[in-house]
Image: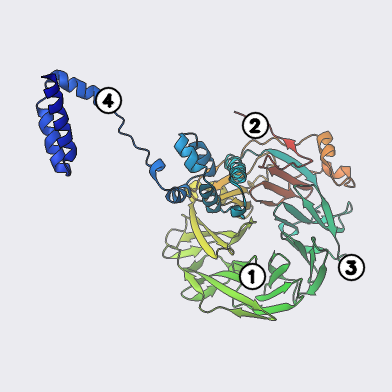
Amino acid sequence: MAEDLNSTALDIITAFEALDTKKARRTAYHGILDLLDLDEWREVKERAESKSLKRDILGSLPVELVARICQLLGLADIVALQSVSTRWHELLSSPVIYRTALRSHGINGPYDRFSDQEMHSIFVRHAKRRLRLELGRPYSEAFYPALLGRLGSENVVAYCDGRLLWADRDQDDGPFGLALLSLTTGTLSRFFTEEREVPFHVAVSDSAVAMISMRGNCFVANFTTSEEACLRLPSAGVYYFTMSGDRVAVITRNCHLSFWDLKSKVTREFKLDVLPLCVAIHPTEDRFTTLHLEHDGVSCNSYHLHDTAVDELVVTHYDVTGTTITRHQPSTVLRPFPENTRASTMYRRVDSAACNIGVLHIAPENQPDKPNLMWISYDPTTDKISTRFVDKKSSDTFLGSFTGWRATHVSNNLVYYISPQRGGWDEDAGPYILNLDTGLVHEPMDISLLRTQQTLEETIINDDTPTDWLDRPMNVLLRTFGDDPFFGWATQTGFKIYCFDEDIDMSWAQTIPQQG
């Protein structure tokens, strides 16, 4: 009899498994549930509570789709999520995930050449660095005494890829050539023109340095090959100066553009219609791009923006071939502005090693008391323009001293800036941290400074620096500089440098104790 009952139960189960539609299965189990008594319902309830209805959606996705999701996550978030489960660790540790996530944060490299273990080490290193940048928690710090002079300006300091360039001064405040400091090795190099001219503007790339003298001469030197040369500019009234590799682009205030490179030593000239917001030289190809503003199809002079109506952002590409410069037609016209927008103050360029970025102070024509900050960035490598708005409510500190701040685009969507108050610059205050995606501003962090005379003397690299300069107040802020591993600022008496990468050993650095 028992065998017959078991056989009947098995027949019911087999028949249920044979049902091939949801409706048929639902009819069958609803009918069985209606026949249950109270004790049987308790058993069903206990069985249901022990059954997990959760599903690992991420773990069931193909790695290519997970990689697209990871583009929206922070690097540190990906590392944290690896500990959720064995499957997540396996999936999120894939080289495909690492490469995609790094590139989505603007961290490019020849990642296809690395082994899985090397990719893991690279990713974790960048994740730690990114987290330190977001929190304002550097790994080490240094002060480097330098004589930038009483008449120093932001134009006499430049930075690129861990190298800091400045127009040096002697103890009598006289010109002492160009000084190039490697922040990773501490190596200091000097460059002089034949007539020891006074640098007025300086620039640096990953392979060369450049300066424009007060006489209107442009000097370029490749520090990897020791090749150098000089060209004569049509005017010393420089509006824009930039370089990439050993190529330089100079725009004078009368809209005259000169493009020159150290290899050919040929000067190409072009008359622009208007002074642009920025000029970007392509890193590998002989071409460059300009950005300027327009209103109703009429160009706006970027040098004289003041309560100026704007409605278009125009991108123009130029090719450099032989001795000529050719402008592409037509230009690309973008319309990112709200209706009836006016630029209330001039465009301010932001120091950046990764792209050309700047900020425009704009306001609606009918609401001039409600200004916004419009961030405009252009990446010459990808030929990509991006515009973002940060409203006044979330950036009062930035707008409060728009003409006095110094800012650096350190990584992807992060900007570090120092905003002097009306009473002067407080050198004890750290930088503000602005997230361009969220518009949120983090207040200055308490970062310990190298204070004592003894400590400063121990950190001097150029031993010929007069000690009395170390006693001069660092109260004149010239500019900020930096990128992923470094951030710092320049004053008339030297540089304050913070390093966010624990694998970089600044020989003069003091490790900052980490809290928590």
What residue is at 45 percent from the left and 63 percent from the top?
337
Q: Secondary structure at mark 1?
A: loop
Disc 3 from disc 1: Cα separation: 33 Å
Residue 264 placement: quadrant? bottom right
469, 111: nearer the viewer: 111
Query: Depth-wise, is mark 2 or mark 1 nearer the camera?
Result: 1
Inspect this view and state whether residue 259 appears: yes
Query: How far apart in space, not on screen, are marks 3 and 4 (Cα)?
Result: 87 Å
Residue 285: assigned label:
1
Report, in whole angstroms, how far the alpha carbon at label 3 lies from the one at label 2: 49 Å
Residue at which label 2 appears = 514
Q: Which residue is mark 4?
A: 49
Q: Secondary structure at mark 2?
A: loop
Residue 195: mark: 3
Q: Amino acid at mark 3?
A: Glu
Which is nearer the N-term, disc 4 or disc 2?
4
Q: Classify the position of the C terminus by image quarter.
A: top right
Q: Residues within 10 Å of mark 3 (few under 14, many from 20)?
A: few
Proximity of marks 1 and 4: CB atoms separated by less than 8 Å: no
* 245 w.r.t. 92: above or below: below
Q: Position of residue 321 (x, y in %)?
A: 66, 79
